[in-house]
Image (spheres, helix red, strand yellow):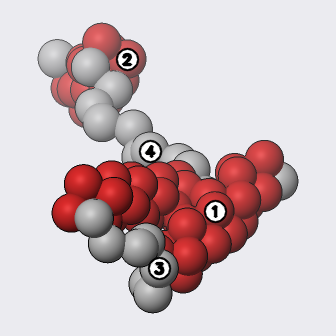
């Protein structure tokens, strides 16, 4: 078969099974996810405070604002 036959077989194998392609990272996805998690935690904290009869306050506005800001930053990074 020779060297040329081996190279052709290797090329055909590569074409048939190119292997894993590197994935392009999507910028902003993790930031958006963290923002959504913070918004969920703030929502759960508000619901538990109301259920317990406590006035919602303290860290809840920080969680809401932080989650919203991180979500917006992630959306901007993902779009651009």
Dot placed on the residue nearer the N-terminal end, 3 or 2: 2
Mark 1 vs mark 4, foreground winner is 1
Dot placed on the residue nearer the N-terminal end, 4 or 3: 4
Tell me the SS state at disc 3.
loop
Tell me the SS state at disc 4.
loop
What's the CA distance linking mark 2 and mark 4? 19 Å
Expressed as whole percent of the image width and height from the top left, the position of residue 75 reads 70, 52
Q: Quadrant of residue 46?
A: bottom left
Left or right: where 4 falls relative to 62: left
Circle 1 residue: 68
Left or right: where 7 falls relative to 29: left
Discs 4, 3 touching: Cβ within 8 Å: no
Q: Residues within 10 Å of mark 3 (few under 14, many from 20)?
A: few
The structure residue drawn at horizontal position 71% and vertical position 59%, both measured from the top left corner, is 72
Expressed as whole percent of the image width and height from the top left, the position of residue 1 reads 17, 17
Q: Residues within 10 Å of mark 2 (few under 14, many from 20)?
A: few
Mark 2 vs mark 4, foreground winner is 4
What's the CA distance linking mark 3 and mark 1? 17 Å
Dot placed on the residue nearer the N-terminal end, 2 or 4: 2
Tell me the SS state at disc 2.
helix
Dot placed on the residue nearer the N-terminal end, 1 or 4: 4
Which of the two residues, 22 or 36, is positioned nearer the viewer here?
Answer: 36
Circle 2 residue: 15
Mark 3 vs mark 1, foreground winner is 3
Mark 1 vs mark 2, foreground winner is 1
Q: Quadrant of residue 17?
A: top left
Circle 4 residue: 23
Circle 3 residue: 57
Regarding residue 4, the answer to whether it shows in the image is no
């Amino acid at each position: 078969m020779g060297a040329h036959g081996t190279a052709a077989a290797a090329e055909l194998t590569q074409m048939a099974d190119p292997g894993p392609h590197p994935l392009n990272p999507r910028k902003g996805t993790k930031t958006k996810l963290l923002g959504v998690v913070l918004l969920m935690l703030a929502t759960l904290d508000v619901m538990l405070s109301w259920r317990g009869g406590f006035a919602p306050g303290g860290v809840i506005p920080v969680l809401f604002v932080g989650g919203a800001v991180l979500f917006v930053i992630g959306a901007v990074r993902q779009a651009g």
